[in-house]
Amino acid sequence: EISACLVGSEMCIRDRKYQMPKDDMYLPLHVGAEGKLDEDGNDLDLGYTKDNSGDNISNLNSSFCELTGLYWAWKNIDADYIGLVHYRRHFSLKKKAGFENVLTYAELRTYLGKIRVFVPTKRWYVIETLKSHYDHTHYPEHLKITRDVLAEKSINDINVYDKVVNRRWGYMFNMMIMEKNLLDEYCNWLFDILIEVFKRVDISNYQSFERRYIGRISEILFNCLLYTSPSPRDRQKSR
């Protein structure tokens, strides 16, 4: 049987636990666990797997956000499909809201081996492109630096990137369920770019919200992957 493991990333807001799916397919993960202490000065333990175990980049969580969870899953989980969801965002094949409608392995199993990547519903920005939306809410230099890094690595990546950032829609939130072979390709490409971008941006005077820029750049880069591979027939959208 084809296996699937979805990492449910717990960002430890106010140092408290959130509800997690009970299905065995889900693995609750404390992202940004490195350096987190409880009121007694001990390592904070929420009862979840921590992203500072095994091969990890947990110490980069303030900028990489849920991507420290994706990196941990990529490096430490052995499954045919690996996915990432959030403590407050989950996949569902139903139109009803509510935790009881979160995607289960029984629902997903039918599609495994047939579809290479599952994505959330497309998000429309109506009057803005992905680039203009980012420029209005963050620092435009981030995307310029990202483009510079891509240009140094591949002209094909630049052509795709320019098309994607000028769209008015995208698959956001860094949520996916992906065939392991494709995830390997994606993460090798993604983290190579993001770590280089991270080296080139001075965040010494950034506030907490501003420091989270790497997680937002990666949303755009995920859409670059979807532009080239897999084809639309190999994707499945979920609410």
Image (tube, grey):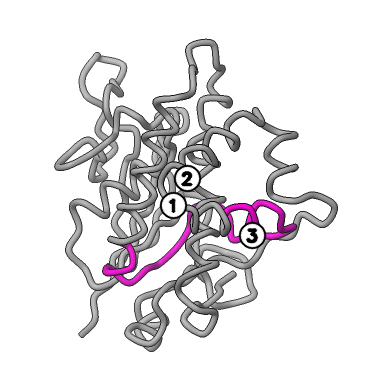
Nearest to viewer (mark 3 / mark 1): 1
Measuring 39% from the left and 61% from the top, which residue is drawn there?
Answer: 21
Task: Name the residue nearer the viewer: 200 or 62.
Answer: 200
User: Where residue 55 sits: x, y (%)?
Assistant: 17, 42
Residue that carries the numbered disc 2 in the rendered image: 150
Measuring 57% from the left and 32% from the top, which residue is drawn there?
Answer: 142
Residue type of the residue flagged with mark 1: Ser
Instruction: Give the numbered dot on residue 170.
Output: 3
Left or right: 171 with respect to 23?
right
The CA span between labels 2 and 3 is 19 Å
Kindly check if marks 2 and 3 are in contact, taking CB atoms under 8 A apart as contact. no
Residue type of the residue flagged with mark 3: Gly
Q: Is residue 77 above or below residue 140?
A: below
For the N terminus, the image quarter is bottom left
The CA span between labels 3 and 1 is 22 Å
The CA span between labels 2 and 1 is 6 Å
Whether 94 is among the magenta residues is no
**Bounds of the magenta span?**
161-183
Measuring 53% from the left and 59% from the top, which residue is drawn there?
Answer: 224
User: Where residue 113 sits: x, y (%)?
Assistant: 32, 85
Left or right: 90 with respect to 139?
left
Question: Could you tell me which secondary element the residue under label 3 belongs to?
Answer: strand
Kindly check if marks 2 and 1 are in contact, taking CB atoms under 8 A apart as contact. yes
User: Where residue 196 sits: x, y (%)?
Assistant: 38, 34
